[in-house]
Amino acid sequence: MPGWSTEAARDFGRACADRAHELAVESDRTRSPHAAAVAGAATTCRIHADAPSTASAYVAWMAFVGYALRWIGTMLDDDDGRSEARRQAGWLADRLGLPPI
């Protein structure tokens, strides 16, 4: 896919990790019953998004980070994580120069 690279994968993973952190802070602030699970998943996202790795491993780990963020969205939203999936799709479309979703 044109535009997809190790750098794009890393940036996607970091954007997902940043969003996971935002959701963890929000879930703690609102005293969500899922706050501890969300915080753990957000920490895992950050570790994998920042880990130095080979190009092929980056793609795999960033897919995992995106999945983990969607899981967090499922824990916190009534829409089964669809809003987080749309947010990720929008980020990817913008970054890769694809039509908006």
Image (cartoon, rainbow, N blue to C red):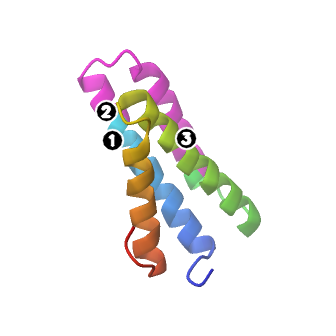
State the image coordinates of residue 7 (x, y, percent, origin top left). Answer: 57, 73
The magenta stretch spans residue 16: no
Task: Name the foreground residue: 94 vs 6.
Answer: 94
**Marks 2/3: CA distance?**
16 Å
Q: Amino acid at mark 1?
A: Glu
Q: Earlier in the sequence, mark 2 or mark 3?
A: 2
**Marks 1/2: CA distance?**
5 Å
User: What's the mark number on residue 25?
Assistant: 2
State the image coordinates of residue 38 (x, y, percent, origin top left). Answer: 45, 29
State the image coordinates of residue 59 (x, y, percent, origin top left). Answer: 67, 62
State the image coordinates of residue 1 (x, y, percent, origin top left). Answer: 63, 80
| Residue marked by disc 1 | 22
Foreground tag (1 vs 3): 3
Q: Amino acid at mark 3?
A: Ala
| Residue marked by disc 3 | 68
Q: Which of the 4 quarters of the picture holds residue 36?
A: top left
The residue most toward the left is: 30
In the drawing, does residue 64 fall left or right of residue 41? right
Q: Are marks 1 and 2 in contact (CB under 8 Å)?
A: yes
Q: Residue at x 44, y 82 (%)?
A: 97
Crowd around label 3: few <14 · some 14–19 · many ≥20 (10 Å) = many
> What stretch of residues is rendered in magenta?
24-48
